Image: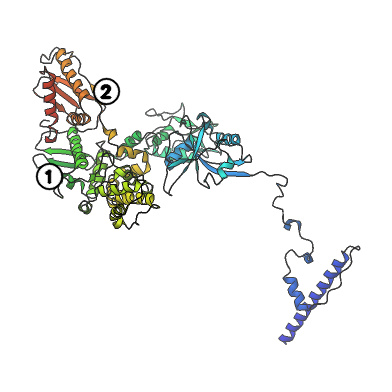
Amino acid sequence: MESTTQSSIAELLREAADKLDEMNSVHSSSNTSPARSTPPAASPRPPVDAEVARLFMPYRSTSRGSLNPRHRPIPRNFETRGTNVTSYSHTFCCLSKKSTTIAPNRYQKLELCNAGLGDKKITFQGKESCPEYFHQCLIGAFRKLSEAGGFELLRIRGATRSRELSLIPCPNTGYCVKYLKSPQAMIGHAVIYIRPLQKSLNMDKEDSESTTTGPLIACLSCGIEFQFDAIKAHSEICNSTTGAVVQAGPSSMCDPLTVPLTASPGSSMPLMPSVALTESGNDWRMAHDPLEAVKLFRQSVMKNFGEELHFRMDLRDSSEARDRAIINFYKRQNVDWTAPLTCSLEGDAAVGDGVKRHCFSLVMSRLQFGFELKIAAGKTLLFEGEKDHLVPSASQIYIDSDLFMVAGQIIGHSFLHNGPCLNGLSKAVVHVLGGGMPEMASIDITDCCDVDVREAVELLKGSTELTADQKRSIQSVTTGWDLPVATEENRRWLTEKILFHAVLSRSKTQIKQLRKGLKATGVLDLVTQRPDTMQLLFPRSCAELHSPQLLLERIIWPAESDSDDDTDDPSLDEKCRITGYLRKYIENASSQCLQELLKFWHGWEVPPNNLYVEVVRGQMPQSSTCMETLRLPSHYTKYEDFCEALNAAVSSVPTGFGLV
């Protein structure tokens, strides 16, 4: 019974499908134009085939009837038919200084953005070959750029982490969109940096043209009404400034502290207290000057309270024992190097900041010129080579003893206390210490301490054809580094590889330990986020030279005493004679002598803002390092006697102070 019912239903569906096909055929024949010949009738198809053909009919088949207009495909050039306008969009970053060579970090970009510079995406409509149109679009996006006297375009070159900027060559007709899109410029999707040509741009905050929106909402803390888009920022400031009273109007009864309010442009309502604006000004990441950034960094990390670090050294011990005390102090782990520091010299009664400066000067001198440790023959010299080309020593004993981690902590700790720095380090090593890619470092032949390697490099740099003996000499150097035999084709490539292996590959572990030590002191965060401070942490030797003019400008000379009570005070003639001797001594002294004089006078070789001189009754020159004062006896009548006595006093620096 069920099978009979199913067969009847199937027959009914087939009959219905046949009827529909007949109706469609009649309808299509009635709509056919009389001028056209009627095509011959198609032979009848089986009902099942007809049903399948109807259900799976192509979407755009005309047998379904006329298409709905909304489903008709629209030509791609329907709206722009008859025009040929092209557009080009790219990201530009406008810099502020005309001497910038490093791409700004995210903090510097935020500061540039606040000044109306920084990153912006600019769209150019047509006129791809017109330099004037390109110039107008950039000026429209960066209004301050009109004051620069021209501009030049740059992009980042090198590896992925490189931030060094290189100039995009300017064609004779000037920069234009067509040139930037051409393969010759090799820009692609890279950010294009705009650098002022003649004048650096000011970093004054640009006035915002936007106005506040939304209804007025009262603050829960102070009760003042603010715009909807400003109440959230105000509430954070208002809640954080506990104890600060905001003056809402004449009816305010609070007098202890009044915090001025700033209003947004285009609105008469106050937005937030101006005290919030001072917080960003103390951020070392946003400071323009590297010196100011270092100063703010020290203020932000150094602690004036809490558990102290105590450094002790016995002056009665041998040089080796004193150096071991230094190594033991800085080899400790998990130490807060930003904590307050107290230094004491056992066997010497001196106290105060002068003792601290003396200790830092002694420690950095040992690091620069070698420790008196009997680890190897001679001094334990952690850095070797020529001035301004020092590289870490390749001694495996130093590496296994973690002495370079100790060196990193010494450098960072002295830098935090504004003490002496390690000068004369190779530029390639400084580049890698700051987080740069080793492959991007510029290596000089003077960075290499190995004489054999230098000779091999000199042979490869020559223009004459290499002899068999010369090739064997070069191969004896490169065998351990798996480098190929020297040929005329690979001479330049082989030279670079030899220098890379001799300078940086050998120093890989040492540099890693140095970075670990710098990280322990917190200084690594400074130099990685502010690369421009690396030159202050590792200055060149020539920058550390002390000139006579530098010292003379900072000396506060003694004046005639106005008191009549002190009858033992030297006369004005005696003061003039002794100070004249000192001036002559400074003018004729070498840089090394001036450095030793500063250590005797101030405690270390870093010159302070002011140096004081006193002429007193006494036998030998003395100094008060805490007070930065040099006391000179008044009894000298010959310059030779004065010079001999001062040299003797200066030479006593390594033995301590001898007085409080």
Q: Number of callouts in the render?
A: 2
Which residue occupies the extreme bottom position in the image? 1
Residue that appears at 73% across and 71% down: 55
The image quadrant that residue 416 belongs to is: top left
Report whether residue 220 is seen: no
Give the CA separation, mark 1 to mark 2. Answer: 39 Å
Residue beneath label 2, please? 553
Image quarter hosting the N terminus:
bottom right
Name the colour scheme: rainbow
Q: Closer to the camera, 461 or 432? A: 461
Q: Amino acid at mark 1?
A: Glu
* Frontmost residue, 239 versus 168: 168
Asked if 612 appears above or below 371 in the picture, the reply is: above
Q: Which of the two residues, 211 or 128, is positioned nearer the viewer here?
A: 128
Location of residue 631 (image quadrant) = top left
Residue 601 coordinates in the image, percent (x, y): 18, 28
Q: Tell me the quarter of the picture where residue 357 sits.
A: top left
Callout 2 amino acid: Glu
Spot occupied by residue 200 in the image (x, y as percentages of width and height): 46, 31
Q: Which residue is mark 1?
A: 320
Q: Which mark is residue 506?
A: none
Camera sees residue 70: yes
Q: Identify which residue is drawn at 11% across, 25% down.
A: 645
Outermost right residue: 34
Q: Secondary structure at mark 2?
A: helix
**Can you give x and y, in whole percent of width and height, for residue 133 in the image?**
60, 35
Mark 1 surroundings within 10 Å by alpha-carbon count, few (fewer than 14), some (14 through 19), many (20 or more): few
Q: Residue 491 appears at what percent x and percent y?
A: 37, 50
